[in-house]
Amino acid sequence: MPITEFAVLELNKPHKFHSSPILDFFRLLSKRQSEYSSFPLVFFEDSKAPSTIYLLSGWRDAEHHMEWIRSEGNQELLQLLGPYLHVKELLHLGIDFGGLPIEGTEYLVFKKYQSENDVDAVDGQRASNIAWSSLGVNVESDAGIVYQIESHKREPSLEELAGERKGGKLVEIISMKHLEL
């Protein structure tokens, strides 16, 4: 089953995404990984914490991604990027990345719910700002936690994001802005 890779990367201080040589390394990562997986990579930065970078991409399945992680090409990239960042989290979501209209998306909101029942409770309060939305679970866990990725037409306000927390068991909500390579 095709999946979506959702990686949380933390830049070490004082480094920034668009500074040299980091941007060059991200371009190389994007080129190599997309050649291996046949899916593009997209990067977003946390609206509240610009040192947090989110990488989204697609894979044929989680095992194919794990093969890439173990590959010589990826291990070399990890060594190059090691002084500049660390991987905080990696999820394999049961969302077909190829089915996401991610091209042209400027703002994403990533939500984590305790269960699928909680999504409906919060989802009923959706704003007209949402262009598309997709739900999935971590394919490597049976914890019942549900993840939602939403594309927003404009940057969501703090009030909109706070309003999403009413009525359900929303564990985490992250607002992010697209980064150009």
Image (spheres, helix red, strand yellow):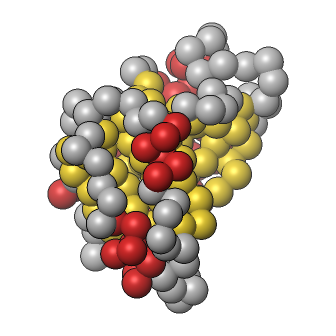
Quadrant of the drawing holding the N terminus: bottom left
Q: Please name whichever residue, 31 or 172, is drawn nearer the observer in this view of the structure.
A: 172
Above-or-below relation of 173 to 140: above
Q: Please name whichever residue, 16 or 126, is drawn nearer the observer in this view of the structure.
A: 126
Residue displayed at 54% across by 53% down: 173
Q: Position of residue 97 (x, y in %)?
A: 28, 57
Q: Position of residue 155 (x, y in %)?
A: 39, 30
Residue displayed at 26% across by 34% down: 153
The answer to whether residue 143 shows anywhere in this view is: yes
Q: Does residue 135 appear to the left or right of 146 in the view shown?
A: left
Q: Please name whichever residue, 142 or 174, is drawn nearer the observer in this view of the structure.
A: 174
In the image, farthest residue toward the top:
20
Q: Please name whichever residue, 19 or 123, is drawn nearer the observer in this view of the structure.
A: 123
The answer to whether residue 44 shows anywhere in this view is: no
Residue displayed at 63% across by 27% down: 50
Q: Position of residue 154 (x, y in %)?
A: 32, 29
Numbered-mark total: 0
Q: Does residue 89 appear to the left or right of 166 in the view shown?
A: right
Residue displayed at 40% across by 84% down: 117
Q: Position of residue 115 (x, y in %)?
A: 48, 82
Q: Does residue 1 appear to the left or right of 144 in the view shown?
A: left
Quadrant of the drawing holding the C terminus: top left
Q: Quadrant of residue 141?
A: bottom right
Above-or-below relation of 25 to 152: above
Above-or-below relation of 81 to 117: above
